[in-house]
Structure formats: structure tokens, C-alpha cells
Image: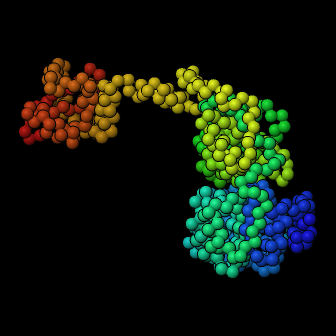
Amino acid sequence: MNFNELGLSDKVLQAVEATGYTTPTPIQEQAIPIALAGRDVLGIAQTGTGKTAAFTLPMLSRLETGRARARMPRTLILEPTRELAAQVEEAFVRYGVNHKVSVALLIGGVSFADQEAKITRGADVLIATPGRLLDFAERGKLLLTGIEILVIDEADRMLDMGFIPDIEKICKLVPFTRQTLFFSATMPPEITRLTEAFLHNPARIEVARPSSTAASVAQSLVASAPGPAKREVLRKLLRAAEDLTNAIIFSNRKRDVALLTKSLEKHGFSVGCLHGDMDQRSRMTSLDAFRNNKVSLLVCSDVAARGLDIPMVSHVYNFDVPTHAEDYVHRIGRTGRAGRSGTAISIVTKADQRYVDDIEKLIQKKIDWQGVTLDQVVDAEPDVEGEVDEGRTPGDRRSRRSQGRGGEGRSASPARGSARGGEARGRGEGRRDAAEAAPVAASSAGPTLAAPPSPSPRRAEPAQPPRSRDERPAGRGTEQRRHRHDEDDEVVIGLGDHVPSFLLRPVRIKASTDA
């Protein structure tokens, strides 16, 4: 079957032909005719199967008649991330080249005023993330009563990100008579409940077994020790890959994305990064640099694991094995797209073995080891003193050395720890009071400063050096000490830490009755 047999309009067919596509994918072949007929669609297909075109092409054909009104878009597409929303916008620009279709994008990290201006002029297609869309609707800047087609894409990702309550609110704001196109890679119970509530007699289209991996992707595991050894393993894999054109490297934590990026840059690799804490401008800059081959490696968190269509990705490296088996399927789905071959390599430590077991159980396939196995890896902790950790600052390494000595770096002895605690209190709460009390002590002490009396045995505490008592605040602390030692009515006044060291000794001053 080719696209001419699906019932698309001539303008859409010309645009598809210009892109070079001739044969529809299974999800497109089955979903497009049903969508053109106006029926609800429940599409279950893993990422990389052409889901975007499966709803973009029929929507363009149906939008050739009619026009949008101000603040009342005709169609609505919900995406879980900004990157996916921007990617769908690009698809409408590419396939709608022969149409006069206005497209508005509502995502975070972009000027609210610019987006409002597009909505006010009228939009045939509104592409949005749930949070920003509800923000517009609640402010009265957007009316959803004119929606003819609602598309919910990557529904299982919406569930993972906690957007299901927002989706339910949005579904109640759009007309009951709208057409709904619903796409998800997996069907957990919560997603099934959502489809039963908001889809009307949908045509269920399942083109691949849920949570399956593409046969065109060669998968393997590489054993490694934890810590800096993992980065060395990754560098060796990158240098040894003969057919690597570009690669996406996944890490589980956002802070490790930045650390790994700096490490690879230091060793001469062309690398960019992408994670959820980056602003929208930085995200798009990194993606564009990777798409345009300005950098060959992209280190990212799971924000890029689903739906991003980056052509010709030859390799995917899991620097960290994902803790959720479903994320593994979506990560390696970035390569081997549209029938191309790809390579997916996961670096595994002994702590990751249970996650590997979950992945193999989910995909119903054993993944081969490349080189040694975990049992053959020497998993000794590196020497902290001699460790070269290129991604960390000297302060980070000092902190780790302190932890390695069982806390010696924080306090060499209980007495020192207590003294430092007293210093902290003196500097924090009572520095101002101590500074005000210092002139009083200087005027009253007289010759006593040169030869202060020896502290009484009752006040001598081995675990509390004199200096820590000297820096105690003179305000509330003075009243408390007077209450504790009212038998001799003596008060210790702090001189502060700005005086010479030979004066930093406790001075006893008889408190007057009218003080």
C-alpha cells in the first residue's frame, strides 16, 4: 500500500511526496483512514513507528475547509514535553507546506505575550503541554469550545510525569462531540481507565507488542566498576565504535548529565547536553546543534527518551541502566528508526543487575554481554586520595576524603567539634551582642585583662575549650548562665574573634545588682 490509497487530499500527498516517503508505516496505514472518517482512534505503538504523521496527515486534510476564530483553536494536540511539542510543530510545517494553516505552540520557557498574540489571531492547530494550556484557559485567554479534533500523544509518558489530572480537566473543557486520537506505547491500568472515560467506541490499533524493542537495534551489555571507571569504559566504547556517526548517551540523574558532559569535553569529544533543568532556549540550542551535526554526542536525561525524532542516530549508550524497564525500550528507540539499523550499549555495574533482569523480562529477550561479565569485574573502590575525578571540583573531592576518613575532616576530636560548634553559635546568633559587650569588658576589667584569675574547678570543662565559652552571645545566653550560676553571680562576657589571640581568654566580671 502507498499513501495514495489512504484517502488523503492532493495537497497532503504532494507534501508527503516532497519529503521522499512513499510507503506508510503500519500505524499510518491503519490509523489514517479511520481518522479521516471522523472516528476515535486508540493507537498502541512504540516510539519510532511514525505516530506523528499518523495524526498530522489526516488533520491537515480535514482542516482544508473552515477557518479558526480568535482564541478558539480548531484542533488541539497535547504533548508531555516541550521538545515533543516543538517537533510536532515542525511536522505541521513540513507536511502543511501547501496549506494556509496557522499553528500555535503553547509551551513553558517561552514568552507568554508572544503565545497570546498567536492565540488571539486564531489558530487552526494548537500544540501544547498540559500545564501551559491550563494556565491560558484559567486566565480566560483561550477557549476550547471550538475544538474539533483532540490528540493525546505519549499518554503513558503523561502518566509518568503526573499529567493525568490535567488531561482529565482538559478533556472536560473540550466539546463532547470532538474526535479523539489517543496514542500510547503501553497501556497501564490508569491509561486504560482514561480511554474508557473519554474515548467513544474507538478503533483499537496495535501494530507492535507493547514494550518490545525494534529488531533492527543490536543490543549489548558492558560490565564496569562504578565511579570514574564507568566514564573510562564509555570513552573506550566511543573510541572503538567504527560506524558511529552520532550517539545519544543517557544518564539517570540530571546532575550526572552535566558531570559526564564536562568529562567528555575534557577528553576531546564533541558533546552537548540536555536535561530538565535547562531553560527552553538552551534545550533547543543543544538539540539543533546535535541535529545539524555540530556536535556528535548528546548527553541527556530521560527528557529525551521518548518521541524525539532525531534522524540517523547510529548509537545509544546507557551510561546508567534505567531503573524502570519501560524507559530502556524508549531510550534505545532513539536509534534504529524507520527500518534503519542501530546499536544500543548499556554499561552495567553489579548494583544494576536487578534492573537488567527486569529489562530482559519485559522485552522477553536475553541481552548478550560484550567482553567480560560482571563476575569478572574487579569492583574495588578507587583510592580516594589518589583518585582523579575530572568532573568534580576540588571542594567535592575534599568532602569525599572527609567521608572516607569517617568524618575526620569535619572534627578531629570531640573537643574540637564542640569548640567549632561554640564558634558557630557565637558568629551566628550573638556576634552583635558580643560586639556590644566587648567595650564593657574592656573598661571594667582594667589590669585583670593582663592577668585574669584562674577559672574555678566548677567551670573547667575538658570537652569545652575556653575560647568557645568566650564567643558565646551575651544577650539571652547571659541571663541563662546567670540563672545557672546565681550562687556566685558571675557572668562570662565574650570579647569577639576580632581581638588579639592573647586576649581570647575568659574574663570574670562581678555583675552589679542594677545591671
Could you tell whether 432 is left or right of 395 in the image?
Answer: left
Q: Position of residue 23 (x, y in %)?
A: 90, 61
Could you tell whether 374 is left or right of 242 in the image?
Answer: left
Could you tell whether 252 is left or right of 403 in the image?
Answer: right
Q: Nearer the viewer, residue 502 or 226?
A: 226
For the point 83% across and 47% down, which residue is it?
216
- Which residue appears farthest toward the top when viewing the image? 451
Could you tell whether 400 is left or right of 69 in the image?
Answer: left
For the point 32% across and 33% down, which residue is it?
421
Q: Position of residue 32 (x, y in %)?
A: 82, 69
Q: Please tell me in which quadrant of the rendered image residue 271 appears.
A: top right
* Observer able to see residue 75: no
Q: Is residue 61 above or below residue 27?
A: below
Q: Is residue 31 above or below residue 319?
A: below
Q: Nearer the viewer, residue 491 or 274?
A: 274
- Which quadrant: the C terminus? top left
Q: How is the image coloured?
A: rainbow
For the point 83% across and 62% down, which residue is it?
26
Tally of numbered tags: 0
Q: Position of residue 19 (x, y in %)?
A: 88, 59
- Which quadrant: the N terminus? bottom right
Q: Position of residue 160 (x, y in %)?
A: 61, 57
Q: Is residue 202 above or below residue 185?
A: below
Q: Please tell me in which quadrant of the rendered image residue 24 appears.
A: bottom right
Q: Nearer the viewer, residue 328 or 448?
A: 328
* Observer able to see residue 15: yes
For the point 48% across and 26% down, which residue is it?
404
Q: Please tell me in which quadrant of the rendered image residue 225 appears.
A: top right
